[in-house]
Image: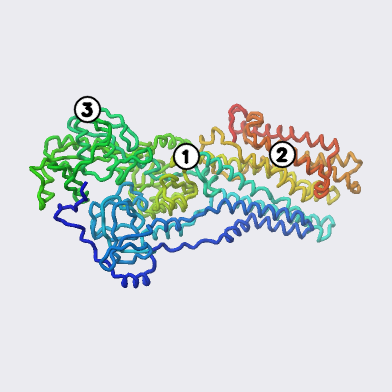
């Protein structure tokens, strides 16, 4: 192939070029304007991020508990709480350390070296040395190093998808601006630097991304609420016990220390580590389903998602143009084939005419389909590569056709909307139907225009192809407009960017789960709407908005957006960011997908940013909370399912933890109500052993419960983690049952040793055995409670005792820890208890069926109030 000639024929000559700067002037401007690199974003030092994990509200509450425990003369308890804070803080820090580095990745988008004119010579310099008014030379495949104003553009098209979301390369002509970080797909160009470093469009988006602060996740808000409630309860009850202690005649110092013990007992030390580890389990499961979580809280946020704003290209579609229809006056040919390979199924009439048309279109194309590592890929413009694949598929031999021997090429011109090539004495023309068909004869033009409308209504991009025989090889001074006339229309090519096969099913699953879906894309409205129809995304009645005509009034736009199936096209990064914010103001938990640099700010703003792992840019991946390793929209729905399961699991072990707290607080209540005459059944160290010892593993096992079959059959959870139903189950049912058997076991041991209420305290060995009975009862009752908490509606025997194997192993470990706490002498002495007597052990064992029976009766009553079937007729874990 000969080099491309500028429009107007060979007489146009070589590229005129731009004068450029002198080395001295360039050095002066480098001092004046600075290096051509994006401004460094202020990063938070690692020690400050670690400190933040150790000083949030819940951690401060634990720090206070540790200090108070030390002041109360319980250094062992103080040290144990500090260990809990440090372990949880370091673990969270490690999980979150892959934080946002979007600005750093943006800097990597600029090339290292670039060709410029300096001192009337073409030299290569480092990109950072570019200055305003430098003359830059570009060829196909180059990345644009700064914002340039083109002085020369021959057959020039630029891929700006990373900035604009537009999937098709845009043709550029002299006078146009191209932006740093974009790619020159075709042709060659020279431009004058219009902006460097912080003055580029890329820097604007980087700054916008850096300014956006992600809102707190629903889980973070819920945990803050739980911590506030817990802190209020701990402080309030501690103050109450302080007053009661004074009223029964206890000294000020002892009353203060006792109140501190009560407050420490009420702080659920194991809650935050359990939440963190449960989120880590959810993240691991998502990774197994090709969803990489970069922010642990995003696991739960996904489950709360109510609105998904999805990109089009590469998310709903395969980002791969394909020629699927060819119309000629002889008939319509359909081509069924994936990718750019030559293999395809060809059906219809007029295959010979279609073959000739494809060769003509290929002659007027630059891009090609080429083999690479065992597969076919696009080289150059994907649309033109699809034309190359079409020619191969229609070729009689099934092989790639020979490259035409061009004598002249006339690149695509946005004013002409077509491009041409001369092979021998034949002129081939390819372009927009409205540009090519009027140059052809009247015969068949009406039918051709009807086919254009028909193809376009199917969401196809339509190209017209025509030819003309020239009387002889054109001379040196021929005029293009003279030869591009009197053409013969060969036919039409319909190109399609196919949607992903699984998208329609995934969209149906999202709607069934009560999640609204909108398409937010930088593509043309017509293209976006066609793909929305093909995938089943667009709603009824159809609503397609364009970025340039979006209402300025936020309330009006928010009302338009807050519906299922809306399509928003031609959006800028700022508009996409605005869409996310408006939906959040409407109360939605927004998941935003994207793959380009232009998506960075919106991904940062959204409650859950979702980036493509295969086709996405590093900027999008670093700005996102979730990365789809397979670029599969359906993976989002799978991740939503796991997120909902994680939310349900947090409710499960929250119920489990709080039930334990009721049993732990009861001994202090009875002691206070008796005026100190009834011995204290549990010590604060025993309570800590329950919270972060025996309870922790079953709680983690509850956090790994698999999603139920109905997880995606209902709307997203909108209730608080601690709602009325959970509070009643904890404080009105399971907690009191545990507390009753705990105190019964404790009292049984004391009475069996001959103690009577109001008498002097029994010997120390009797008190330790009684306390051991109370401790054992709580552990065994929690064993039953762990199985009961697997569901809020179904008894454990309906679920299967061994269906959660982690819970079985956790319960066995719990029993092992109980034995260690009771029979390991030094540890038992530190905790202040001893193995229970046979009578105390019998009561403790009776707590297991009692908890299960109470839970079953509660679930029956719950079903009757709801008017549903008896528990167990349909297995559903909530």
Task: Tell me what residue is drawn at x 42 percent, y 58 percent.
Answer: 107
| Disc 1 target residue | 635
Question: Depth-wise, is mark 3 or mark 1 nearer the camera?
Answer: 3
| Disc 3 target residue | 349
Please say if 604 is above or below 303.
below
Please indicate, yes or no, whether residue 704 appears anywhere in the rendered image: yes
Label 1 vs 2, first from the N-terminus: 1
Give the Cα separation between the discs numbered 3 and 2. 73 Å
Number of other residues with Cα within 10 Å of mark 3, as a class: few under 14, some 14 to 19, many 20 or more: some
**To which quarter of the image does residue 631 belong?**
top left
**To which quarter of the image does residue 192 belong?**
bottom left
Q: Nearer the viewer, residue 323 or 469?
A: 469
Number of other residues with Cα within 10 Å of mark 2, as a class: few under 14, some 14 to 19, many 20 or more: some
* Secondary structure type for disc 2: helix
Q: Position of residue 318 (x, y in %)?
A: 37, 40
Give the left or right position of residue 340, taking residue 797 as reference: left
Label 3 vs 1, first from the N-terminus: 3
Q: Nearer the viewer, residue 373 or 549?
A: 373
Q: Position of residue 640 (x, y in %)?
A: 51, 41
Please indicate, yes or no, whether residue 541 appears anywhere in the rendered image: no
Give the Cα separation between the discs numbered 1 and 2. 35 Å
* CB under 8 Å between discs 3 and 2: no
| Disc 2 target residue | 813
Task: Tell me what residue is drawn at x 77 percent, y 54 percent.
Answer: 76
């Amino acid at each position: 192939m000969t080099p491309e000639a500028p429009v107007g024929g060979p007489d146009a000559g070589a590229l005129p070029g731009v004068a450029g700067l002198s080395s001295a002037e360039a050095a002066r401007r480098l001092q004046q304007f600075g290096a051509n690199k994006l401004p460094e974003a202020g990063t938070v030092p690692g020690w400050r991020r670690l400190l933040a994990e150790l000083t949030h509200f819940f951690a401060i509450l634990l720090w206070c508990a540790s200090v108070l425990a030390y002041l109360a003369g319980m250094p062992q308890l103080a040290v144990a709480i500090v260990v809990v804070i440090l372990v949880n803080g370091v673990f969270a820090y490690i999980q979150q350390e892959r934080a946002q580095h979007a600005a750093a990745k943006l800097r990597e988008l600029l090339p290292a070296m670039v060709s410029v004119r300096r001192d009337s010579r073409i030299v290569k310099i480092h990109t950072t040395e570019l200055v305003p008014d430098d003359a830059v030379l570009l060829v196909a495949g180059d990345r644009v190093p700064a914002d340039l104003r083109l002085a020369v553009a021959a057959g020039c098209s630029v891929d700006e998808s990373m900035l604009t979301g537009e999937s098709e390369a845009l043709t550029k002509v002299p006078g146009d601006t191209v932006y740093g970080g974009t790619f020159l797909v075709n042709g060659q160009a020279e431009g004058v630097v219009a902006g460097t470093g912080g003055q580029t469009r890329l820097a604007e988006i980087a700054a916008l991304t850096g300014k956006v602060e992600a809102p707190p996740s629903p889980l973070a808000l819920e945990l803050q609420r739980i911590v506030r409630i817990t802190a209020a309860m701990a402080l309030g009850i501690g103050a109450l016990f302080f007053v009661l202690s004074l009223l029964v005649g206890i000294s000020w110092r002892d009353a203060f220390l006792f109140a501190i013990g009560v407050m420490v007992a009420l702080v659920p030390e194991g809650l935050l580590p359990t939440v963190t580890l449960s989120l880590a389990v959810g993240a691991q499961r998502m990774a197994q389903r090709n969803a990489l979580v970069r922010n642990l809280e995003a696991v739960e946020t996904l489950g709360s998602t109510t609105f998904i704003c999805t990109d089009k290209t590469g998310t709903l579609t395969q980002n791969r143009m394909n020629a699927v229809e060819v119309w000629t006056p002889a008939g319509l040919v359909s081509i069924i084939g994936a990718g750019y390979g030559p293999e395809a199924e060809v059906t219809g009439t007029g295959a010979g005419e279609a073959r000739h048309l494809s060769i003509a279109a290929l002659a007027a194309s630059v891009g090609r389909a080429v083999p690479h590592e065992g597969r076919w890929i696009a080289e150059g413009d994907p649309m033109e590569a699809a034309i190359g694949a079409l020619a191969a598929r229609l070729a009689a031999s099934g092989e790639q056709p020979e490259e035409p021997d061009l004598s002249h090429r006339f690149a695509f011109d946005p004013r002409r909307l077509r491009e041409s090539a001369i092979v021998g004495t034949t002129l081939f023309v390819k372009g927009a139907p409205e540009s090519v068909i009027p140059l052809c004869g009247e015969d068949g033009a009406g039918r051709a225009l009807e086919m254009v409308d028909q193809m376009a209504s199917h969401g196809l991009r339509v190209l017209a192809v025509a030819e003309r025989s020239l009387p002889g090889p054109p001379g040196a001074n021929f005029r293009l407009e003279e030869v591009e006339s009197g053409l013969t229309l060969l036919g039409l090519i319909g190109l399609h960017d196919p949607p992903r096969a699984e998208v329609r099913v995934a969209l149906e699953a999202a709607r069934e789960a009560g999640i609204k879906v909108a398409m937010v894309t930088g593509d043309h409205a017509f293209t976006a709407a066609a793909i929305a129809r093909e995938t089943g995304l667009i709603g009824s009645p159809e609503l397609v908005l364009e970025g340039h005509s979006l209402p300025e009034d936020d309330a009006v736009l928010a009302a338009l957006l807050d519906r299922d199936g809306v399509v928003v096209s031609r959006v800028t990064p700022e508009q996409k960011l605005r869409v996310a914010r408006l939906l959040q103001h409407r109360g939605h938990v927004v998941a935003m997908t994207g793959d380009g640099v232009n998506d960075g700010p919106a991904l940062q703003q959204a409650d859950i940013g979702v980036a493509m792992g295969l086709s996405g840019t590093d900027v999008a991946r670093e700005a996102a909370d979730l990365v789809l390793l397979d670029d599969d929209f359906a993976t989002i729905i799978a991740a939503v399912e796991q997120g909902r399961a994680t939310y349900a699991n947090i409710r499960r072990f929250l119920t489990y933890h709080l039930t334990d707290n009721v049993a732990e607080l009861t001994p202090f209540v009875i002691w206070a109500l008796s005026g100190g005459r009834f011995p204290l059944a549990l010590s604060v160290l025993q309570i800590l052993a329950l919270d972060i010892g025996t309870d922790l593993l079953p709680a983690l096992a509850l956090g790994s419960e698999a999603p139920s079959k109905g997880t995606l059959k209902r709307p997203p959870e909108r209730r608080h983690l601690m709602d009325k139903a959970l509070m009643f189950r904890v404080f009105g049912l399971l907690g009191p049952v545990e507390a009753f058997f705990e105190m019964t076991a404790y009292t049984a041991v004391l009475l069996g040793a001959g103690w009577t209420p109001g008498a002097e305290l029994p010997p120390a060995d009797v008190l330790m055995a009684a306390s051991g009975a109370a401790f054992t009862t709580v552990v065994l009752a929690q064993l039953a409670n762990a199985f009961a908490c697997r569901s809020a509606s179904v008894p454990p025997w309906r679920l299967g005792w061994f269906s959660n194997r982690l819970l079985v192993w956790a319960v066995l470990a719990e029993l092992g820890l109980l034995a260690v706490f009771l029979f390991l002498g030094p540890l038992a002495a530190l905790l202040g208890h001893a193995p229970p007597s046979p009578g105390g052990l019998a009561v403790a064992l009776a707590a297991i069926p009692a908890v299960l029976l109470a839970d079953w009766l509660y679930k029956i009553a719950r079903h009757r109030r709801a008017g549903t079937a008896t528990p167990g007729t349909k297995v559903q874990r909530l």
